[in-house]
Image (cartoon, helix red, strand yellow):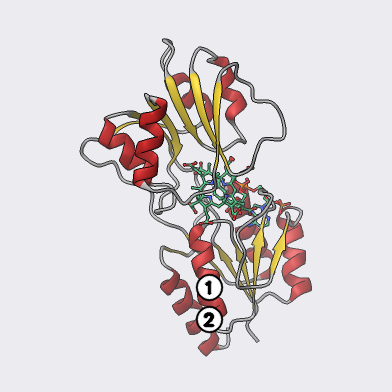
Amino acid sequence: MMRVLILGGTSDANLLAAAAARAGLDAIYSYAGRTRAPSGQSLPTRIGGFGGASGLAEYIRREGITHLIDATHPFAADMSRNAVAACEATRTPLIALEREPWAKMPGDNWIEVSDITSAVAALPENPARVFLAIGRQHIERFSTKPQHVYTLRFVDPPDRSLPFPDADLIVSRGPFTLTGELEMMRSRGIEWIVARNAGGTGARAKIDAAREFGLPVVMLTRPELPVRLRVESVAEVMQWLSHRACLGA
Ligand code: 3Y8
Ligand code: NAP
């Protein structure tokens, strides 16, 4: 009997969960527990880490998981690596639902960097108004350039003071619209954007707005992930599941 674990936390994962529920699949949706009130799901959910790859393997065995879908964000590299290791250890079929990175378009002014240190280095020395659209986990690193006026965007209100003398905080979970991003950037006089190449539509609007205003974007490229079966649409995941159900595998 098929029992599916979905590693979620993205808008694509939310769409997959709805499709799995509609198909009457026996599936569990898993959050890391990063946000205070994750969006509700049409599937049973679990919240919190598993305890590394071994903890996930243990969970798979204990819960009788027969198929695992990694629908986490492209930057959730540790989770994706653990999923590959745990599925190898338990011989559990694994598929990743991962959207294509955003491709640079004519008019884009991107400075592509591979890590946060290079992203900080890419910002100018002269004071500027910088929109840090990379959440809250890594913003301290930018405190080495306190000359800038930072606009930050978090999912939840911060639980500690911000490491900048002069920061403007937006609390919003997205998905975001082009109109909203244009208005936000214009009203705050944004001159630079720092973003991750999340792909998908939920966070793309800021990139389109930057192009419209001709603003430079410091674009963090994705971490390397292990090779695993990877598709870009919910339909392909559902086909994979139904194909394996027919095989009884
Ligand atoms: C907890 C689930 C939906 C899902 C929304 C998508 C779209 C908005 C792009 C900006 C960039 C950022 C951040 C972002 C995106 C969607 C999608 C996506 C970026 C939620 C969610 C969870 C998280 C965790 C959170 C991180 C943070 C990253 C904010 C839910 C809303 C900046 C990534 O406060 C924290 O600790 C937040 C941590 C990991 C990165 C960071 O380092 O701060 N996502 N985001 C998941 C869990 O617990 O398992 O709360 O409902 C999901 C979404 N995040 O409802 O449609 O692409 O799917 N999320 C980045 O790209 O850099 C926002 O502001 O423009
Ligand atoms: P990460 O760095 O790859 O994972 C760190 C640890 O968090 C993992 O080792 C695992 O803990 C736990 N974890 C991560 N995702 C989980 C899930 N879906 N269910 C259960 N445990 C999970 O991940 P992250 O970047 O912090 O992302 C955390 C969550 O936010 C993920 O669900 C991701 O999809 C979502 N998200 C992340 C980003 C981003 O920019 N990273 C953007 C949007 C959404 P254990 O080792 O203890 O098992």
Label 2–label 1 contact, CB within 8 A: yes
Q: Amino acid at mark 2?
A: Arg
Q: Residue at x 59, y 44 (%)?
A: 155
- As drawn, the residue found furthest toward the top would be 126
**Horizontal and vertical percent for residue 194?**
44, 31
Quadrant containing the N terminus in the rendered view: bottom right
Q: Which class describes the residues within 10 Å of circle 2: few (<14), some (14-19), or many (20+)?
A: few
CA separation, marks 2 and 1?
Answer: 6 Å
Q: Is residue 190 above or below residue 127?
A: below
Q: Which class describes the residues within 10 Å of circle 1: few (<14), some (14-19), or many (20+)?
A: some
Residue 230 shown left or right of residue 172 in the figure = left
**Which of these two is toward me, 224 or 153?**
153
Residue 62's label in the rendered image is: none
Secondary structure of residue under mark 2: helix
Q: Is residue 174 above or below residue 142?
A: below
Residue marked by disc 2: 22
Quadrant containing the C terminus in the rendered view: bottom right
Q: Amino acid at mark 1?
A: Ala
Q: Is residue 185 above or below residue 245?
A: above
**Horizontal and vertical percent for residue 54?**
75, 58
Q: Is residue 174 above or below residue 42?
A: above
Residue 162 shown left or right of residue 195 in the figure = right
**Horizontal and vertical percent for residue 248?**
57, 88
- The residue carrying mark 1 has its beta carbon less than 8 Å from ligand 1: no
- As drawn, the residue found furthest toward the left would be 106
Q: Residue at x 72, y 30 (%)?
A: 160
Secondary structure of residue under mark 1: helix
**Horizontal and vertical percent for residue 103?**
31, 45
Residue marked by disc 1: 18
**Which of these two is toward me, 206 or 169?**
169
